[in-house]
Image (cartoon, rainbow, N blue to C red):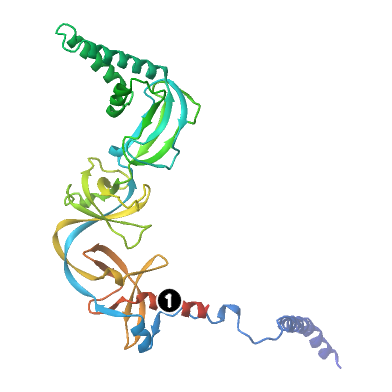
Amino acid sequence: MNKLARSIIAAALPALLILSAGLVTSGCRAKAGGGSSDPPASAAPERAAAPDSVTLTPGAIAAADIKTVKAEVKAMGRRITAAGEIEWNARRLVHLTSRTAGRLERVLVVRGDRVRPGQPLAEIYSPDFLALQAEYLQAAARARRHAGDPQEETTARAFLAGARERLSLLGVPASEIEALDASAAPEPLLSVLAPFAGTVLESAVVTGDAIELGSSLFRLADPSMLWAALHIQEEDLGVAKAGVEVVLTAHALPGEEFRGRLVLIGDVVDAATRTVEGRVEVANATGRLKPGMYVEGTAAAGGERPALVVPEESVQDDNGRPIVFIKTGDRTFTRRVVKTGPRFAGAVEILDGLAAGETVVTSGSFLLKSEILKGSLGED
């Protein structure tokens, strides 16, 4: 090899070494990857979505008593809707305090107990009560002794009336005063009586407590007539009228309605929510409504507008989402998520997710929901 050739090879050798190192590194990386031709994890196929349709046999349709109706547009009177909470009726809420000093000999109820009108809640030993009974008996004897005496009868009757009034101020009912007059034997204990039927919200005392005049004893509420404090939107104030009927639905009691009357519209707009309090008085004879429950109230506001409606029984709850089932084939039904509006006269307004003329299931949708759920579980 001549001198020129050796010079060319010496100049090219560093470049050849670098190229060789690159090829070796690339080969090692390929080997470390296992030489696999599988696609990356991100390219793996997604799990199939849960089915939204179900096809039933004619026998299953008959057994489930599936019935359908077409969604249609109807004239709907303008209505306002407001959310709110159930509260105790402040006019049927009482704080019972002691009307005399003494000692609690017996406490007969505790928090949560239901009581009847006139039911004893506690019994108090009170020297003042004993003294007033003795005073009454003396006044009654004096009135009998001077009956018919023109000079003394008026004074004696005035003393008797005063003694009776002082017993009444202690909470002694007229029937017990009459019984005291008949027996002439003082009662040893003063009973604290329930002024109405209700629930004991708070019991602040126990047997043996020494109490003073005005000591807190019980808080009592009547659950048969409650208030719903609704938050009426500012834009609805022009059409909201006191005295209208309000239909209440409770989040905790789906499918149930409670009817009350709007008795008050507040005078102040809340600066944060732009709402005004509306007070609804609602009967609660069954006790299903509980103070603290979230409710939604709907009331007529005059005027009419077109609305797409379906029967109430068409709308089902699916994990907090309202759904309906659409008939999409001879025996095929498809689940559809919808957005609902106000309820009225057994119907629900559909704001989104449904078109007029589509056929919705009214009866038997529970079976359809179960079949789709089984399909979802199978996919999982």
53 vs 281: above or below: below
Q: Nearer the viewer, residue 44 or 111?
A: 111
> Can you name the residue that lies furthest to the bottom here?
1
User: Going by the image, does 125 lie left or right of 352?
Assistant: right
Q: Secondary structure at mark 1?
A: helix
Query: In the rendered image, which quarter is residue 149 located in?
Result: top left
Q: Position of residue 313 (x, y in %)?
A: 30, 70
Residue 183 in view (yes/no): yes
The total of numbered circles placed on residues is 1
Name the residue furthest right: 1
Q: Looking at the rendering, which quadrant does residue 57 occupy?
A: bottom left
Locate residue 203 relative to residue 315 in the image: left or right. right
x and y percent of residue 194 in the render?
35, 35
Q: Which of the two residues, 220 or 31, is positioned nearer the viewer here?
A: 220
Q: Quadrant of residue 39?
A: bottom right
Using the rendered image of the protein, determine whether residue 49 is visible from the camera's viewpoint. no
Q: Residue at x 44, y 37 (%)?
A: 109
| Residue 49 as seen in the image, left or right of residue 261 | right
* Foreground pick, 35 / 256: 256
What residue is disc 1 on?
Answer: 370
* Residue at horizontal 42 percent and vertical 42 percent from the top: 113
Amino acid under disc 1: Ser
Left or right placement of residue 20 versus residue 282 in this view: right
Residue 75 in the image: x percent, y percent? 15, 68
Callout 1: few (<14), some (14-19), or many (20+) C-alpha neighbours within 10 Å?
few
Q: Quadrant of the N terminus?
A: bottom right
Say if 231 sits above or below 5 in the image. Answer: above
Q: Position of residue 45 (x, y in %)?
A: 54, 82
Q: Is residue 194 above or below residue 58?
A: above
